[in-house]
Structures are given as C-alpha cells and as structure tokens.
Amino acid sequence: MYTKIMVPVDLAHIERIDKALVTAADLARHFDIPVCYVGVTGEAPSAVAHNPTEYAEKLEAFGREQASRHGLTVETAARIGHDPAIDLADTLIQAIADTGCDVVVMASHVPGFPDHIFSSNAGSVASFAPVSVFVVR
C-alpha cells in the first residue's frame, strides 16, 4: 500500500512528537517499509545546531536512535529553509517529492484561536501535499 513514510521532526522539541514517532514506527513495521525523518533548519545558528552540517549530523544520529529503538530501516533528510518559521510547510511538501515518500506522519498541537485564522504547518501540509498525511495529536 505504502512504500516510504516521511516523518517531519523538530529536534528542538522531540518530546512533543513521541506519539507521531510511535505511530510512524508502527506503520513502518506493519507495511515493512522505511521511514525518512525530515528536519528543517535555517542557515543561522539555532538552539539545536551551529550550522546546517551540524544539524544534519544530529538528525542522522536521531534517525539511528529511532532505527535501533523501533527496529526500522531509516534514512534522514535535512533541509535548509530561508526562514523555517515561515516556509516550513512548503519545504516539507518539497521534501515529499525529493525523498519519494508516499505517506506523511506528522505531529500537531491542539489548535487554538490563531489556528482558525492561520493554518498550522500540519494543516498546510495536509491540505497541499500530493500524498496521504496522518496528523497525530
């Protein structure tokens, strides 16, 4: 049914996406398919990494840890966004095509008032992605 799962991850807030990580791992084991963890960073230093190369290394280490923890075949894809706070959804949608994934499992937060005016990143990806998107709260 599916051939590869994409899971967007925010390395600064891993504790908030555990439910999505477990859901993706369960789907990957069920369909016997790989998981691609995608992270988006900017060029400027952040709380996670000093530069995009360091960010990619940390994302790769995260992927290895998930592979070991859940018994998965894993790849990682670090993407650089001009301003990740603004272009995150567009960057993730492009990553779907770049990685060849055909399903996305993505964490979201409980919507608040601003989400009724401005779409959340998960909402934008679900609305515009050319593949199935599971949004996990």
Image (cartoon, grey):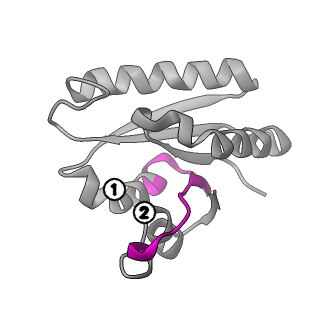
User: Which secondary structure lies at badge 1?
Assistant: helix
User: Which secondary structure lies at badge 2?
Assistant: helix
- Binning the other alpha carbons within 10 Å of mark 1 as few (below 14), some (14 to 19) or many (20 upward) gives many
Q: Amino acid at mark 2?
A: Asn
Q: Is 132 placed left or right of 55 in the picture?
A: right
Q: Residue at x 53, y 50 (%)?
A: 100
Q: CA distance from mark 1 to mark 2?
A: 7 Å
* For residue 104, above or below residue 52: below
Which quarter of the figure is the N terminus placed in? Answer: bottom right
Q: Is 80 placed left or right of 66 in the picture?
A: left
Residue extent of the magenta highlight:
96-115
Q: Residue at x 51, y 68 (%)?
A: 111
Q: Is 124 placed left or right of 29 in the picture?
A: left
Identify residue for label 2.
Answer: 121
Residue 129 at x, y percent in the picture: 50, 68
| Foreground of the two, 122 or 30 | 122
- The outermost residue toward the bottom is 117
Q: Is 29 placed left or right of 46 in the picture?
A: right
Q: Residue at x 73, y 46 (%)?
A: 23
* For residue 98, above or below residue 10: below
- Binning the other alpha carbons within 10 Å of mark 2 as few (below 14), some (14 to 19) or many (20 upward) gives many
- The outermost residue toward the left is 44
| Foreground of the two, 108 or 132 | 108
Residues at marks 1 and 2 touching, judged by CB atoms closer than 8 Å: yes
Identify residue for label 1.
Answer: 88
Q: Amino acid at mark 1?
A: Leu
Q: Residue at x 20, y 23 (%)?
A: 50
Per the image, is 23 magenta?
Answer: no
| Foreground of the two, 114 or 77 | 114
Which quarter of the figure is the C terminus placed in? Answer: bottom right
